[in-house]
Amino acid sequence: MRSKEIKKPTWEEIYKHWKYVCEDLFSPITNTVSIVDIPVKSCSYITNNSSMVIDWWPISEIEKRKKEIEDDQSRIIGFGLNKGTKHTMELLYELRDNPEGIAAVWIGVYLKDKEDNYPKAWRGEMAQIVDYTYGEVIRKLDKLNVYTWHHAMREAIPIDLFRGWTYMLGEDYRPASFESLMTWIALESVLTCTTWTIVRVYDKDKIIGFKRK
């Protein structure tokens, strides 16, 4: 008996479906990257060689973290993003003016996280769909001349509904098609975008020459 042929979506199909779901939820994620400028008093969080530091914070923690930076003059390492999450942040920041690039990062990182830790219920046909779709997204990012995630980078996104206390969702929910997979990826993207934001922390005494964009 011949096995069922796996649908191999093009980048255009991937982008179209993800964008449709995000726009249906009235999310600005399809056009821009959320960036909040955080002016602070002079402190060692910002190195002597830079006028600003890029970080990724929970939106609910912004005021608390700003105060911690200003109160703790010895803080120099930020708030502990792992290498994978930090790289995702850097990709989003680098591609912030490119809507398709932004989409490729969001889609790619969530597919990567699924590949790194497949729920048992996803094995078989859905795993093949994830693998092929991820490869197509990586090809898109390669065309944009950016460095994608190293295979050793794990947990490259702040929120993944298949990790932590929501991990059982991966076993209870199995996408029935490429379209339902992309709907799930879009929902996770929007959730992260509405609860986390990239911040530009800068020394307000060294603001000269800093262009906000």
Image: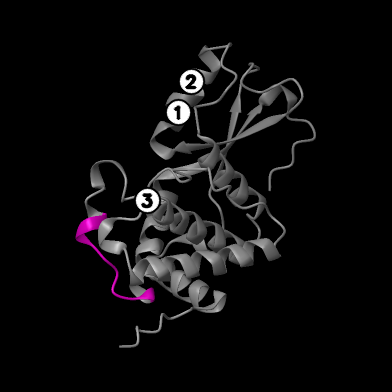
Q: Secondary structure at mark 3?
A: loop
- Amino acid type indicated by mark 3: Asn
The crowding category of the residue bearing disc 2, from other C-alpha atoms within 10 Å (few below 14, some 14 to 19, many at least 20), is few
Q: Give the percent coordinates (x, y) of residue 190.
A: 41, 57
Q: Nearer the viewer, residue 142 or 80?
A: 142
The quarter of the picture where residue 140 lies is: bottom right
Residue segment shown in magenta: 170-178
- Mark 3 or mark 1: name the one nearer the start of the chain: 1
Q: Cβ–Cβ below 8 Å for labels 3 and 2?
A: no
Residue 213 inside the magenta-drawn segment: no
Name the residue furthest right: 209
Q: Are marks 2 and 1 in contact (CB under 8 Å)?
A: yes
Relative to 206, is 92 above or below? below
For the point 55% across and 78% down, which residue is it?
12
Q: Is residue 171 magenta?
A: yes
Q: Residue furthest left?
A: 172
Q: Which residue is mark 2?
A: 67
Label annotation for residue 117: 3
Mark 1 nearby-residue class (10 Å; few <14, some 14–19, many ≥20): few
Between label 3 and label 2, give the one nearer the viewer. Answer: 3
Q: Which mark sits nearer the N-terminus, 3 or 2? A: 2
